[in-house]
Amino acid sequence: MAASVKSFLRSAKGTVSTLRAFHRSVPAAVQMNVRDALNQAMDEELERDERVFLMGEEVAQYDGAYKVSRGLWKKYGDNRIIDTPISEIGFTGIAVGAAMAGLRPICEFMTFNFSMQAIDHVINSAAKTNYMSAGLQSVPIVFRGPNGASAGVAAQHSQCFAAWYAHCPGLKVVSPWSAEDARGLMKASIRDDNPVVFLENELMYGVAFEMSEESQSKDFTIPIGKAKVERQGTHVTLVSHSRYVSYCLDAAAVLAKEGIECEVVNMRTIRPMDIDTIEASVMKTNHLVTVEGGWPQFGVGAEICARVMEGPAFNYLDAPATRVTGVDIPMPYAKILEDNSLPQIKDIIFSVKKTLNI
């Protein structure tokens, strides 16, 4: 009897083990929102290099206006996470001077609209000093904060500054879309010896993305100046940055049901622009549509079109390039007017069909 019971238990044990192995599921992918990706990247760089510090309005005790610096003041204290007065021209000058003296500041603007108060320091002090010193004086600083339109904040708080800062030699300008972009580009920006304008988007902070295993490493960085093809396609190239990459992917999903395959290029960096990736895509699809939230005149899309026209990809175009942009007016406050002042998915679909003559 005892022997038969033991035999039964042994066989049952083997059966359970087999069933467990059969039903074992693949581990769920790690998800992280853009806010946490930025926070984690700054945390790791603050820990890695004691020269790194963060300063700006409400970044310390309040954990940041958008909670991007949550927990950093408690961990690193007053000397490395510094609350400033409401004076962009003052604290930006201090940050640039600190960078010239050998530190690596992260200067937060509560919104890049407020960077206009400090643009002399960003352009004339930070961007030009390396050239004017014949390369003897570097200015390793990151200017970061939300850029572009949010929701219901009207004309003075809704501008996209990608084209403004990308116009200036001496600056690097990055504009991440996903959490992986944000994490990798923030770490690369902090480690860079040049001034970097890091354009975030308020409406993307709470959006979660799957993170690759590689991107979770403390050594993970994304090279500044390298775009990424987010979706492969054969009929038309959509080039965008920041929040509007999502719009392009949504438009591409709709168009795919109609047999139109869009290739979506996430710029990641505005300056230096990865024109090679854009040109390679255009030479493959023979059509180009650029998408951005900024104004049309002298914008990012205008620069992309000019570069494509001047380069080898121009001979591959089967139709004129098309731009989808914000409307050429100050941002209205009323929601219905605001919605009609910014690119929508339907606008991208319309432009794609116009380009393809459908």
Image (tube, helix red, strand yellow):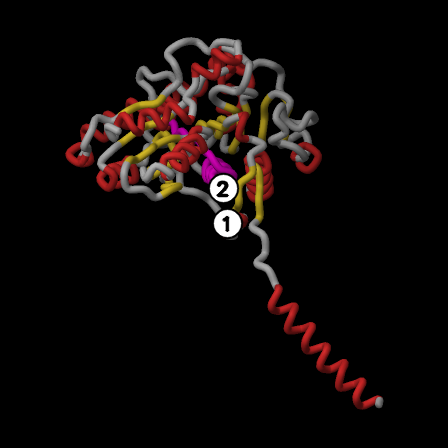
Residue 157, given in percent of the width and then of the height, sits at 51, 14
For residue 212, which numbered disc appears in the image? Answer: 1
Compute the Cα span from label 2 to label 1.
8 Å
- Up-down: is 12 above or below 276? below
Q: Is residue 71 magenta?
A: no
Quadrant of the image for the C terminus? top left
For residue 237, which numbered disc appears in the image? Answer: none
Compare residues 170 and 310 and report the one nearer the observer. Answer: 310
Locate residue 77: give its quadrant. top right
Label 2 SS: helix
Label 1 SS: loop
- For this orientation, the residue located farthest to the right is 1
Which of pointers 2 and 1 lies earlier in the amino acid sequence?
2
Are there few (<14), some (14-19), or many (20+) residues within 10 Å of tag 2? many
Locate residue 14: give its quadrant. bottom right
Residue drawn 43% across and 29% down? Answer: 244
Are there few (<14), some (14-19), or many (20+) residues within 10 Å of tag 1? few
Residue 65, given in percent of the width and then of the height, sits at 62, 23
Q: Which residue position holds label 2?
A: 180
Q: Are marks 2 and 1 in contact (CB under 8 Å)?
A: yes
Residue drawn 76% across and 80% down? Answer: 9
Quadrant of the image for the N terminus? bottom right
- For this orientation, the residue located farthest to the front is 258
Q: Disc 1 residue type?
A: Ser
Residue 333 seen: yes
- Up-down: is 273 above or below 167? below
- Up-down: is 61 above or below 43? above
Compare residues 99 and 299 and report the one nearer the observer. Answer: 299
Residue drawn 54% across and 48% down? Answer: 216
The residue range painted magenta reads 170-190
Residue 139 seen: no
Q: Disc 2 residue type?
A: Glu
